[in-house]
Image (cartoon, rainbow, N blue to C red):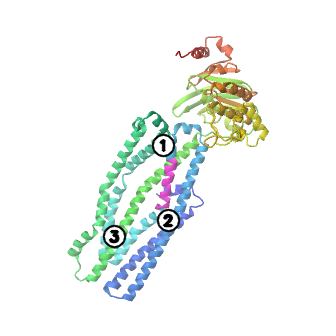
């Protein structure tokens, strides 16, 4: 358990002192509370045995003072631990957000959003409980049983012996009440799976409504629900027997004690002293019951805490392990691209193996091939989205890892098929590419990208808000604004990944003009399934299973029996298809 807290307190370096204050406060509170029970014994003796009302009143006031002071110390300890717990939970969530922002694309390929959310959100919440409630409970739970035994023997050997028996039986039942560790691990894994699949299901709820699908059609979610319900029931049933015996022992304490009193009563003991011992036994057994319950929960939450911390640290490690390591070089000599024996795969699935090729500066290239041949992977590796498994990627004669992250972002522009715009104005969406740009430069980028016709539709022109609080744009219109952003960025390398695949015919002409302005004088890598759009590039690279099988101009590749020629012929035939009504 202490290893868990050592790990957790690492994330709250400024507030960790609160934990130590809380431990000391709880320990003092426990000592004062047990002390109040000691004086309770003296109070009862003065009141029932010697009938000394004056002394009884003094002990009564002392009991109240010790109890109130002990309670206040415990309250302050819990309050401090809650402050620490909330700060810890906040820091862990921030750490998760920072990790998600900086993690590589491979992390998102290998981890579903539902699983990621569950690990960060739910486990961060669990650490709050472990810190806010268990730090004071642990301090009290470790001290109280031992002090109760000592107090029991101070009252009388009979009370002490009975408390010792109760403590030993409770200790024997404690492990079984907390549940088997392996069982708890299975339960936690089932809960994680259920949470992950539930998030994925909710995100697809529109599909469920449109097609009238049932929960059972989402097989993974259905399987997760069944698995969790079984594990939860099995876990509860495994703890039921010992827990019932434990409760019966304490709740039936009076019927257990009375026969023992009748059989083993000390004839020389006055009835008043016997009453004092019985009352003290009931009081101390109640405190013992609460203490053992706290120990049980400490054991259970200790496992959950260890699991939570391990899972958080594991996912934090996963976020950073595949991230590209950047250097200090902030200037590109030129934009010549080299792949030297590059190997890469998504998890166990290999995509590229010892791939080598060169792209000269200032030329336009097209990558084509079947889906999964590695076209988009090359573009993403060049942009630093993934860390390669082997080989070297060079720009301007230097390895990609030698450049700073800022220089790569500044000098490589990536236009995706599905352009992402933010819920702000058209102007602000373009300005994001270069926040220091002047207004005239932003407006010129919008003009070159053919966005004037878009702005003319709205009275607020470039200040029109996009999104739920503003206007909605078509796919082609969004793409032209994304191109304006890339034009303003003025990067040396332009990557177009299916950038015109889903554009409607009305936007096709404007989009092609925008592309012409964007690509002028740049090193361009174009990925397109629309083969008519790549005929005029300087060179075409045909890919198959992660390898370049052909490269050349359109004229060169069409002049012989090539895979490119075959695909162009198939594309031409497909364009002639018509639906006859």
- Percent position (x, y) of residue 302? 44, 56
As rendered, which of 446 and 144 lies closer to the eye? Answer: 446
Q: Which image quarter: residue 557? A: top right
**Extreme left residue here?**
263
Overall secondary structure of the magenta section: helix
- Residue placed under numbered mark 2 in the picture: 78
Q: Is residue 327 visible?
A: no
Give the residue at the far top of this rendering. Answer: 560
Name the residue tied to disc 1.
199
- Nearer to us of marks 2 and 3 is 2
Q: Residue at x 69, y 29 (%)?
A: 337
How far from the left and from the top, in percent, is residue 172?
A: 32, 60
Badge 3: residue crowd in 10 Å (few <14, some 14–19, many ≥20): many
Query: What residue do we see at 40% from left, 62% from top?
Result: 295
Question: Upstream in the sequence, badge 1 or badge 2?
Answer: 2
Residue 285, disc: 3
Please name whichever residue, 501 or 18, is drawn nearer the observer in this view of the structure: 501
């Amino acid at each position: 358990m202490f290893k868990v807290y050592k790990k957790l307190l690492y994330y709250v370096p400024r507030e960790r002192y609160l934990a130590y204050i809380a431990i000391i406060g709880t320990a003092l509170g426990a000592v004062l509370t047990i002390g109040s029970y000691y004086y309770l014994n003296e109070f009862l003796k003065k009141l029932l045995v010697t009938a000394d009302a004056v002394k009884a009143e003094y002990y009564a006031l002392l009991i109240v003072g010790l109890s109130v002071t002990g309670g206040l110390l415990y309250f302050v300890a819990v309050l401090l631990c809650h402050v620490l717990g909330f700060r810890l939970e906040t820091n862990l969530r921030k750490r998760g957000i920072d990790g998600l922002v900086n993690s590589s694309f491979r992390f998102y390929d290998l981890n579903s959003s539902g699983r990621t959310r569950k690990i960060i959100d739910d486990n961060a919440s669990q650490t709050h409980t472990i810190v806010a409630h268990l730090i004071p409970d642990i301090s009290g739970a470790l001290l109280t049983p031992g002090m109760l035994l000592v107090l029991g023997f101070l009252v009388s050997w009979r009370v002490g012996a009975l408390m010792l028996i109760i403590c030993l039986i409770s200790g024997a039942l404690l492990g079984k009440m907390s549940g088997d560790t392996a069982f708890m691990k299975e339960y936690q894994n089932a809960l994680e799976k259920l949470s992950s699949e539930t998030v994925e299901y909710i995100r697809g709820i529109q599909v469920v409504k449109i097609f009238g699908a049932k929960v059972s059609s989402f097989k993974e979610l259905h399987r997760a629900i069944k698995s969790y319900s079984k594990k939860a029931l099995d876990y509860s049933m495994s703890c039921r027997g010992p827990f019932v015996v434990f409760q019966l022992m304490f709740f039936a304490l009076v019927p257990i004690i009375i026969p023992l009193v009748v059989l083993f009563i000390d004839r020389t003991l006055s009835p008043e002293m016997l009453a004092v011992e019985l009352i003290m036994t009931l009081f101390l057994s109640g405190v013992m019951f609460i203490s053992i319950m706290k120990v049980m929960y400490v054991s259970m939450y200790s496992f959950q805490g260890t699991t939570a911390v391990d899972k958080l640290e594991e996912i934090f490690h996963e976020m950073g392990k595949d991230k590209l390591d950047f250097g200090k070089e902030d200037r590109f000599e030129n934009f010549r691209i080299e792949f030297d024996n590059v190997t890469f795969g998504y998890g166990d699935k290999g995509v590229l193996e010892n791939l080598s090729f060169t792209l000269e500066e200032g030329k336009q290239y097209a990558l084509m091939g079947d889906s999964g041949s590695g076209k988009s992977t090359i573009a993403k590796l060049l942009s630093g989205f993934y860390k390669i498994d082997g080989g070297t990627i060079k720009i301007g004669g230097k390895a990609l890892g030698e450049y700073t992250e800022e220089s790569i972002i500044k000098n490589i522009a990536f236009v995706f098929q599905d352009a992402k715009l933010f819920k702000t104005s058209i102007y602000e969406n373009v300005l994001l590419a270069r926040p220091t740009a002047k207004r005239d430069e932003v407006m010129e980028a919008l003009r070159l990208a053919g966005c004037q016709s878009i702005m003319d539709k709205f009275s607020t022109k470039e200040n029109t808000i996009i999104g739920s609080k503003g206007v909605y744009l078509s796919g082609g219109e969004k793409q032209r604004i994304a191109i304006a952003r890339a034009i303003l960025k003025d990067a040396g390398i332009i990557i177009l990944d299916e950038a015109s695949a889903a554009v409607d015919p009305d936007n096709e002409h404007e989009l092609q003009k925008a592309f012409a302005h964007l690509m002028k004088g740049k090193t361009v890598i174009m990925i397109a399934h629309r083969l008519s759009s790549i005929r005029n590039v300087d060179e075409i690279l045909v890919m198959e299973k992660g390898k370049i099988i052909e490269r050349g101009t359109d004229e060169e590749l069409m002049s012989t029996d090539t895979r490119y020629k075959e695909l162009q012929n198939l594309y031409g035939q497909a364009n002639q298809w018509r639906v006859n009504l």
